[in-house]
Amino acid sequence: MNQAHFPITAHGVEADEPRKSGAEAEERVMRLINDAIQQHRVQPGDRLVERELSAGAQANRQAVRNALARMAQAGLVNLTPNRGATVVQYSPETTRQIMHARIVNEGAALVALAGRLDDGGRDRLEGILRQEAAAYDEGRIIEGRHHSRAFHAAFTELAGNVMMSRFVSELIACQPLLGMRNSGRQSSFSGVIAHTRTLAALLRGDGHEAESVNTQLLLALEREFLRESTADPA
Amino acid sequence: MNQAHFPITAHGVEADEPRKSGAEAEERVMRLINDAIQQHRVQPGDRLVERELSAGAQANRQAVRNALARMAQAGLVNLTPNRGATVVQYSPETTRQIMHARIVNEGAALVALAGRLDDGGRDRLEGILRQEAAAYDEGRIIEGRHHSRAFHAAFTELAGNVMMSRFVSELIACQPLLGMRNSGRQSSFSGVIAHTRTLAALLRGDGHEAESVNTQLLLALEREFLRESTADPA
DNA sequence: CGCAAGAACATTGTTGACAATCTTTCGGCG
DNA sequence: CGCCGAAAGATTGTCAACAATGTTCTTGCG
């Protein structure tokens, strides 16, 4: 696979930061990799070399190692002994499984949340939705996607089940790796309309409608991902 | 909390094994802790000292560290900076959340599995169920519980969704920590009857009946856990 | 020219020592 | 007698050197 001539170097980073270690450095490494994935600067299959990450995130190698272990457990990275870490490459079947897991758990969250969404929660969801719509309107697709994921993560978290929230967050985190074969053209798929309908149903207290809308959205997303991965231009 | 005068030492272990490192040692450490939890040799809140685990599992300290990190991410262990690891202590609310997450995901697995359970899967579930029933009949409660968890893990795995299977496995893994306040008396709660009905419904292709039975079982288990944790004899 | 064996290189895995932090103990003071 | 504070001890966190493994390049042979 791709050899990782690393585009992973912080772009506008200030010179010689104190190279802090510990949990902070771990977070930095994970952010570095996640950002690189979301901005399509690394592709599934690319190797993630410890030394490069260490330099790129101003972190100790041990911190890099810990971060990679965590991301491997979260399913974002493939870690094979003595051969290091690579970005995972999801098969169509795994794509379907991820989306089904999301349908089930996000659906349960929406049903649980309907009717007991307080003002704070409503404001939060409306805020994210507004940012998402604005980003898509102005053509900032990647940022729009980010807000879209935040919307799903937010209503799941608001439902109050910590376990399911963590799980869904993990599933959402691997979304940038699902639709990735279309190197050139950016699919302009947007969930703004569905999100608006979901939020309206939530406020109305109609959990099943919210779940249904969300399920349809996720199924459409799944079709999009699978279409992208079969129509490989290379 | 309890100070961990460690009962964590392998009982019938042979002298001076080569103290292997790496993934193998990590597995050993996790087994050591899991066994200690399941056999009630450590309680929620107990500290897990790296040096003791290192000695008990014939493992390097780094391996212990990695194992603890993984178990922390899985939610079995609480890891606070500079103060080490403790066995997690679930609140009643978290107990409810865990059981609800299991209800949702195991239910989805049962619905997906119904009707397309092949002979191999049926044999596997029947085998586990037989072992479970035998263990309870002969009064080996802890082993019975083990097989019971294996049953839930097995039908979830057979459903074929790797993500949901991993998640449910994690949830099941923290079950020994839920019903734990009743130091002395062992609750003889058994899921054998419910499991039998679940399996029958599966073979019949009636996924919703299987889901319903399983949900009722998990709710009963939840009540059992909550009853145990409120009725504290100390 | 193709291919295989081996050396040179690159990368990951492991180990032990040291530093930072927390906990306990002991002594002094009010 | 109780309490505050400092030292001693225990435990975790960090680091860099070393070992083991994998990869690539070169070289010699068929």
Image: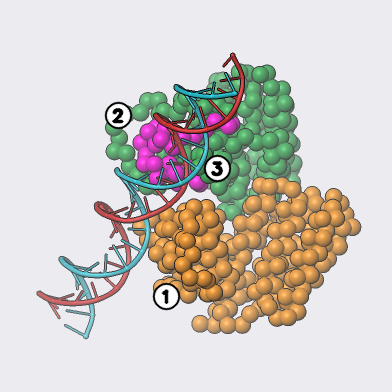
Chain colours: A green, B orange, C red, D cyan
Q: Residues within 10 Å of mark 1 (few under 14, many from 20)?
A: few
Q: Which mark is residue A80?
A: 3
Give the magenta range: A43-70
Q: Residue at x 61, y 82 (%)?
A: B185
Name which residue type carries label 3: Thr
Given the image, what chain letter belongs to the residue carrying mark 3? A
Q: Residues within 10 Å of mark 2 (few under 14, many from 20)?
A: few
Question: Which of these two is toward me, A30 or A218?
Answer: A30
Residue A221, by quadrant, is top right
- Share a chain, discs 1 and 3? no
Name which residue type carries label 1: His
Name which residue type carries label 2: Ala
Residue A213, by quadrant, is top right
Residue at the spot of label 2? A15
Query: Is mark 1 in CB contact (under 8 Å) with mark 3?
Result: no
Given the image, what chain letter belongs to the residue carrying mark 2? A
**Which label lies toward us, 2 or 1?**
1
Where is residue B140 shown, x and y percent of the image?
68, 78
Q: Residue at x 42, y 54 (%)?
A: B62
Q: Compute the Cα span from label 2 to label 3.
A: 34 Å
Where is residue B42 shown, x and y percent of the image?
50, 72
Residue at the spot of label 1? B5
Where is residue A1 shown, x and y percent of the image?
58, 28
Q: Residues within 10 Å of mark 3 (few under 14, many from 20)?
A: few
Q: Compute the Cα span from label 2 to label 1.
A: 49 Å
Report whether B83 appears left or right of A219: left
Q: Is A64 one of the magenta-colored residues? A: yes
Q: Compute the Cα span from label 1 to label 3.
A: 37 Å
Where is residue B64 shown, x and y percent of the image?
45, 58
Mark closest to the chain's N terminus, 2 or 3? 2
